[in-house]
Image (cartoon, helix red, strand yellow):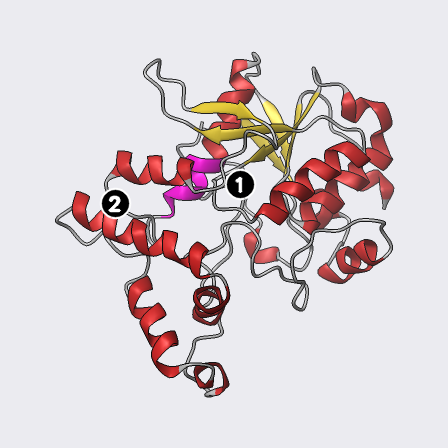
Amino acid sequence: MSGAFTLPPGLVQVSFSGGRTSAYMLRRLLDANGDTMRDEDRVQIVFANTGREMPETLDFVAEVGQRWSVPIAWVEYRPGASGQRFTITGRQGASEQGEPFEALIRQKRFLPNQRFRICTQELKVRPARDYLRSLGWEHWTAAIGIRADEQCRLRPAQQRERWERWYPLAGAGITKQHVTAFWQTQPFDLHLPNVAGKTPLGNCDGCFLKSEAFLAALARDHRERHAWWERMEALAQSLTTGSGGCWSKRYSRRELRERVERMGPGLFDLEGALCQADDGECTDDGDLEDAA
């Protein structure tokens, strides 16, 4: 199985989302390739921060770098007058109030949604790509942390992309059970709840691809974090006269919060009151063909 984690020839980007699965992938790559993984001329480990990650995620990324003695490039979307669309930060300078995401909304004048999932592309994929190109990279392999039990998320490379997609976890048959078992043996972990192999508060805290039940729990348990998503709906509605002012066509975040407040704890016990199904899952590899 270790051969599945041997680096391919040429330049390699390791996409680190800040979650347990991609950190597990990084650990296996380190074990299989040794000091080559720390050669920044050959390998770049990239974490793209949208500004809506939980503080625990940011702390985890920093701790991974420190404990495993590996350099991690922190990039953020930051449109500038020069045309450069990214900036380099670190744990100390990382945005925590949604600044990159809000800048994107103001520029596009509408909210991303299930049909137009531009946030992954603009806040993660493109800043990472632009950063690597600033280093002189033209073509590379991107290691993406998608497991063998997530076959529906595997996508071939598009012709216009500058990178080849590589899924070492899927190739090695790694499932969420392997990842969970690994972290149970480690001296540190991501300090966010693990619910049946998922991290509800991982990635963007109130992502529109999370289930209605998860988002209602965010409104109940993390009011200040839910409030940002409400404010962005109000902002988008002030910027557009079209239909791009809500994260979901089924409800606004204000409506969801008011429902939680009106019905109280009983809402979560009422069968069928909240949709439990995830509408999808945010990924680092993107969905559009024009990422090159």
Q: Is residue 4 left or right of residue 209?
A: right
Question: With 207 as the anchor, is 116 left or right in this view?
Answer: left
When the figure is inspected, residue 91 is found, relative to residue 179, above or below; the finding is above
Picture layout, residue 117 above or below residue 258: above
Q: Which amino acid does label 1 sit on?
A: Asp
The image shows residue 31 at horizontal and vertical percentages of 86, 36
Q: Does the magenta stretch include residue 118?
A: yes
The secondary structure type at the circle numbered 1 is loop
Q: Is residue 241 left or right of residue 234?
A: left
Residue holding disc 1 = 285
Mark pair 1, 2: CA separation: 22 Å
The residue lying at 41 percent from left, 83 percent from top is 273
The spot of residue 261 in percent (x, y) is 37, 75
Q: Dividing the image into 4 quarters, which one contains the C terminus?
A: top left
Residue highlighted by disc 2: 110
Q: In this view, does 124 lie above or below 219?
A: above
- At which x and y percent is residue 118? 37, 42
Residue 207 seen in this snapshot: no
Foreground: 9 or 53? 53
| Residue type at tag 2 | Phe
- Which residue does the image show at 57% across and 16% down from the upper left? 137
Quarter residue 196 falls in:
bottom right
Report whether residue 105 is seen: yes
284 above or below 281?
A: above
The secondary structure making up most of the magenta span is helix
How crowded is the residue under tag 2: few (<14 C-alpha within 10 Å), some, or many (20+)?
A: many
Q: Which of marks 1 and 2 is nearer the N terminus?
A: 2
Residue at the image position 48 percent from the left and 40 percent from the top: 50
| Number of numbered tags placed on the structure image | 2
Residue at left offset 56%, top offset 11%? 136
Of circles 1 and 2, which is in front?
Answer: 2
Please provide the residue range marked out in magenta.
117-124
